[in-house]
Image (tube, rainbow, N blue to C red):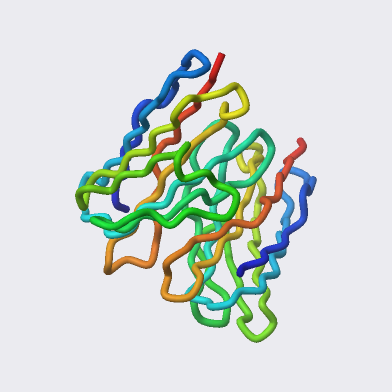
Amino acid sequence: GAVVSQHPSRVICKSGTSVKIECRSLDFQATTMFWYRQFPKQSLMLMATSNEGSKATYEQGVEKDKFLINHASLTLSTLTVTSAHPEDSSFYICSARDARNTEAFFGQGTRLTVV
Amino acid sequence: GQNIDQPTEMTATEGAIVQINCTYQTSGFNGLFWYQQHAGEAPTFLSYNVLDGLEEKGRFSSFLSRSKGYSYLLLKELQMKDSASYLCATWGAAGNKLTFGGGTRVLVKP
């Protein structure tokens, strides 16, 4: 299957700072990327969907000014958690699909801890 | 919108068979996935069904009935390493959104 690389795998930051998470499709062009958040023992909750070159579509209840998503190229999307707080501590996972493939391929996930 | 239901937890014995059911209600449907997820890791793809029927892949099989909004994942010859969460997910209309159910934690006991 296709490879999606997510970086960093773990990050600890201080409350009030911003953190950027990168998601790259390594061997295909990702026309659509999805960002999920997962709290312990819960399932993946879709935060937003982004299509290359356009603004992301956020799910209800997700603050677009707090979770900035950029999908400037067909191989890279970034999620920036701005002014992070301890309640933002979670596992963030990206997935990507191309225009031909029905499957979505997942990155390795990023464990964010805000202290 | 999309609504996906699956049991929260299941326990089974090593070597046995377990069936995880998933029911869904979606405003559009473009296929159903099953993923396996071990704690602290990203989900890994198990199966994809878009037409009715059974898809078999080794010890894992997945079934879909679109008219009933129903799928199941069958795990045979259970091994200890199969202890994980199993996530049911559907593509919405135009394949523009992949939505997950709550996941089923399967515990395999010796």
Residue extending furthest front? A65
Percent across and percent down for residue B41 are 51, 35
In the figure, residue A70 lies in which quadrant?
top left
Residue pictured at 77% horizontal, 37% vertical? B109
Percent across and percent down for residue B86 are 62, 50
Q: Quadrant of the N terminus of chain B?
A: bottom right
Q: Nearer the viewer, residue A19 or A104?
A: A19
Query: Is residue B47 positioned above or below B55 on the image?
Result: above
Residue B86 shown left or right of residue A99 in the figure: right
Residue pictured at 32% horizontal, 53% vertical? A1
Residue A66 shown left or right of residue B39 in the figure: left
Residue B13 shown left or right of residue B88 in the figure: right
In the figure, residue A51 lies in which quadrant?
bottom left
Residue B104 shown left or right of residue A57 in the figure: right
Percent across and percent down for residue A71 are 28, 48
Residue pictured at 67% horizontal, 70% vertical? B24
Q: Quadrant of the C terminus of chain B?
A: top right
